[in-house]
Image (cartoon, grey):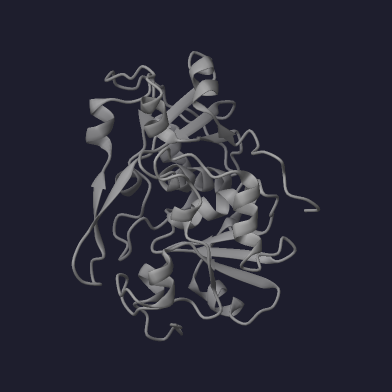
Amino acid sequence: MNETPSQYSEALVTCDWLEAHLNDPDLVVFDCTTYLVPTEGPNRPYDIQSGKADYDAGHIPGAGYFDLQKHFSVADSPYRFTLPPAQETAAAFARHGVSDGKRVVLYSRKNLQWATRFWWMLRWLGFDNVAILDGGYDKWVADGRITSTSQCKYEAGQLSINLRPELFVGKDVVQSAIGAGEVCTINALTADLHRGENPRYGRPGRIPGSVNVPATTLFNPETIELLPIDTVAQAFAGIGADPTKRIIVYCGGGIAATLDAFLLHELGYRDIAVYDNSMSEWANNVSLPIETG
């Protein structure tokens, strides 16, 4: 990467664009919303609340709904949102109407990280014709655009797999990267969690040597639109993220990390991985090192 892009790519679409293309025959749109309800104690940092009820109450016309925990995560994992095997993940997408040759647009409510999680999963499978709706449902409604309560009618599709296994990594890869000068490990959680002031996920702290770019600081909290691309570029450059290095991004459960990863991809970084399970696993494994301060 020689210079910062002047704008986002076609992987990010506006509400104006989506409204103009809603009736395209090859377009499928999905609401990806999940909510995390904070709880007391590190053994259960949050309860998961599906966004299906809000989807049923109103969504972008024609859109389907992706339930991350119910249909796109390992049911018996000790962690929330663990990525299923590729064949299972591709089959779940196909059942919902994602198919080779389709153009996919993803949106979520209150936070783009739920849409970017699915964006990253589709890229992991080798499917690239997918975009995030900037501002999500919040921007759509704030602009006064029409909504619907009709259920989705997408037919099941056929989705090929051209796996990019390097896009998701586990704890062993992350541990081996500690102290490696050619790797930059980024924590997408809030600053208090990064410093070790909050034990939400178990042992407080961070993966040693990791740097912090909170996903919540990369979008406008009122409009849910991403910050200008040059502002985002400065945030990553400011913590030493070098596009010549391997980048590993983590968070609490591999969700917020995908927002950082999406933006790094938009900036031209190409060697990016997300640590699936993230601090939900790391902070509760006493054999893994942790750092505070």
Viewer-nearest residue: 273 or 203: 203
Residue under the image location 25 percent in, 33 percent down: 54
Q: From the top left corner, tell me how far across and down residue 158 is, in percent.
A: 51, 30
Q: From the top left corner, tell me how far across and down residue 186 is, in percent.
A: 55, 66
Extreme residue in the right direction: 2
Tell me where residue 270 sits by quadrant.
bottom right
Viewer-nearest residue: 232 or 88: 232
Q: How many marks?
A: 0
Q: Is residue 97 above or below residue 74?
A: above
Q: From the top left corner, tell me how far across and down residue 132 is, in percent.
A: 51, 36
Q: Is residue 95 visible?
A: no
Q: Decide if residue 17 is on the left or right side of residue 9.
A: left
Residue under the image location 66 percent in, 68 percent down: 240
Q: Is residue 174 visible?
A: yes
Q: Is residue 140 above or below residue 233?
A: above
Q: From the top left corner, tell me how far across and down residue 188 is, in percent.
A: 48, 62
Tell me where residue 177 sits by quadrant.
bottom right
Q: Is residue 289 above or below residue 130?
A: below
Quadrant where the C terminus sits is bottom left
Viewer-nearest residue: 23 or 87: 23
Q: Decide if residue 41 is on the left or right side of residue 109.
A: left
